Image (tube, rainbow, N blue to C red):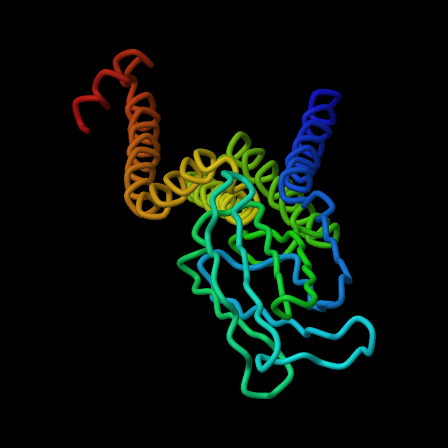
Amino acid sequence: MKYMKNRNYAIVLGVMMFLSLLSVVSAQPPFQQSETAIGITIEAPIIEYHKTNGDFEFYIHVHNATSGLLLDNTTTNCIIHLYCTDDGEHVIEDAMPFNGNGIDFKYDVLGSNFTNNGQYAVLFYCEVPGERGGFFEYGFDINPTGSEFTIAQGILYGFILILLAAFLYFTIYGIKHAEQAEWLIGYICASYLVLYLVISVLWILAKDYLFTFPALGNILWILWLVMGFGFLPFIFVISLYILGKEARATLEKDLMKQGYSREEAKEMSKKHR
């Protein structure tokens, strides 16, 4: 009983450590932003998370810092700089067109510029040539979900994994104590399916939030794929083995009732495979 309790504690501790690792890896350091008002003020909606390979439209409002009036492309030029801060790559440096609504400067960034997961930064610079200028910058994350791994998600995934671990424990317990072949096969099938679900959940977590460790996601994906295709062959083989073993045991009992010794009955049952 003490061993069982210790094992349960170990399972729960392992799940919590895994989810803590997710929080550490997926958490974004505080992004830096700066603004200068040397005649121009720039405002931009800050979106901290974007999806991998997803298109995104950057908008900015440009104001005269003194009067607060909007500036447009008749007097003002704006450029965008986009960086991948993880590898230092300068992704985009280009002029920003003025939007047809008469308010925004806008730049459409294709998802092909967001193929790498990790930290990015964008900087906007605008100027009225020869008169005034200003800039604005901030950082954001690119990840497979386009969102942050939250505490609520951690609790949900933790509950699911603990629940699956409990089911797995009971199915393994059933395997050890099953007395009939049908129940044994049923418990083995249930254990396989529960383990498959555990691998599926871990793969989703690794794929979406542990993208800095791609090897882990690849290993879990291979396990998930092999177990998915291998379920029916595994159950077929294990069923044949268990039913064959059950049939031999029944034949041994019949032979022993006929007067044969246990050793003789065992040898004779092997010949009738």
Is 208 above or below relative to 63? above
- Residue 27 image point, x, y percent: 68, 44
Q: Nearer the viewer, residue 264 or 115?
A: 115
Q: Residue sitting at 66 percent across and 51 percent down?
A: 149
Residue at the extreme bottom: 101
- Residue 150 image point, x, y percent: 71, 52
Q: From the viewer's perspective, tell me whether residue 233 is left or right of residue 163.
A: left
Q: Residue sitting at 56 percent across and 46 percent down?
A: 205
Q: Residue sitting at 36 percent across and 48 percent down?
A: 228
Is 68 above or below relative to 265? below
Q: Nearer the viewer, residue 189 or 66?
A: 66
Is 41 above or below relative to 92? below
Task: Say whether residue 10 is visible.
Answer: yes
Is 267 above or below relative to 217? above
Residue at the extreme front: 130
Q: How many marks?
A: 0
- Residue 22 image point, x, y percent: 64, 40
Q: Residue sitting at 74 percent across and 50 percent down?
A: 151
Q: From the viewer's perspective, tell me whether residue 151 is left or right of residue 255.
A: right
Q: From the viewer's perspective, tell me whether residue 173 is left or right of residue 222.
A: right
Image quadrant assignment for residue 21:
top right
Task: Say whether residue 190 is visible.
Answer: no
Residue at the extreme left: 271
Q: Quadrant of the C terminus?
A: top left
Q: Quadrant of the N terminus?
A: top right
Q: Nearer the viewer, residue 48 or 207?
A: 48
- Residue 257 image point, x, y percent: 33, 24
